[in-house]
Image: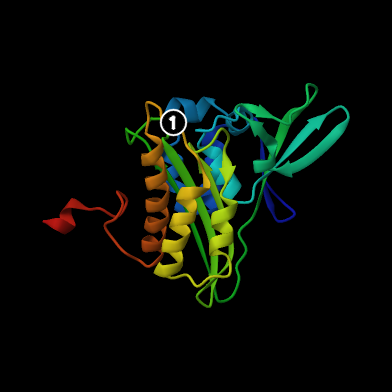
Amino acid sequence: EAQNGHLVIGAAASLHDAFAALVQRWPELSTFATRFAGLPVRNSGTLGGNVANGSPIGDSMPLLIALGGRIVLASLRGQREMALEDFYTGYRQNLLAPDEVLAFIKLPLPATTTGAQSLLRAYKISKRYDDDISAVCLALNLCVADGVVKAVSIGAGGVAATPVRAVQTEAALLGQPWTQASVQAAMATLRAEFEPISDMRASSGYRRQVLGQLLQRFWLESQGVQHINLESFKLEALA
């Protein structure tokens, strides 16, 4: 439900219901929502379970980080709130005390700013398109006004021991003109910001390369370029 300018999602809400609420407010997330696990998991699994599990390849966390997500932890002692990216301390480790539960996830609702352009995308790279675990997940949330990046938040998965926020890349983009040159510089920063491992899903080098390419794709989509993703690719148009 909406509370004081935030979308508040209970931790026990199913993934299906949670993503339905997200897509209602951010329609551009519809494809990403359908690629989260499979239908049975989306109907039975919970958003809070994915967040509390803390897997570095969990797909909801990069998106929630990019949306400025905060979590509320609760116990008989009361409640405490923190940014989602601050919750994780290491591989599957977090700040949850033994007597606490994850109660809510809070997201600032999108605001309409005159003359500003809001850009949001979440990308999942996996070996299979459907029902597969991510090799890389990247979520980008930008506000551009007068051709300049006024606000930016980037969440990433599959590139570190925890879901992470790309703070160096955010700094490289903030205050810069939203141009190909600025994006190229930020791509280099993004590739150097993390030290992903090599495993059965992808090599470290592949993950680094893909991070930069997803930022390039984000730029191209913001410029209205077509036929660069499966959503816009139509066989009929090529006939």
Q: Position of residue 17 (x, y in %)?
A: 55, 37
Coloring scheme used: rainbow
Q: Residue at x 22, y 53 (%)?
A: 234
Q: Camera-side residue: 90 or 227?
A: 90
The residue nearer to you, when weighing 179 against 114, is 179
Query: Viewer-proximal residue, 212 or 48?
Result: 212
Splitting the image into 4 quarters, where does residue 200 fall? Answer: top left
The image position of residue 152, as x and y in percent, is: 57, 60
Residue type at mark 1 is Ala
Q: Position of residue 214 (x, y in %)?
A: 40, 51
Count the marks: 1
Q: Is residue 62 visible?
A: yes
Q: Residues within 10 Å of mark 1 (few under 14, many from 20)?
A: some
Residue at 78% x, 21% y is: 98
Residue sitting at the far left: 239
**Residue holding disc 1:** 37
Q: Residue drawn 41% across and 35% down?
A: 135
As displayed, is residue 10 above or below residue 25?
A: above
Q: Is residue 64 left or right of residue 215?
A: right
Question: Where residue 199 appears, x then y in whole percent?
Answer: 40, 27
Residue at disc 1, secondary structure:
loop
Q: Is residue 81 above or below residue 26?
A: above
Q: Is residue 73 left or right of residue 76?
A: left
Above or below, comparing residue 60 to residue 165 in the picture: above
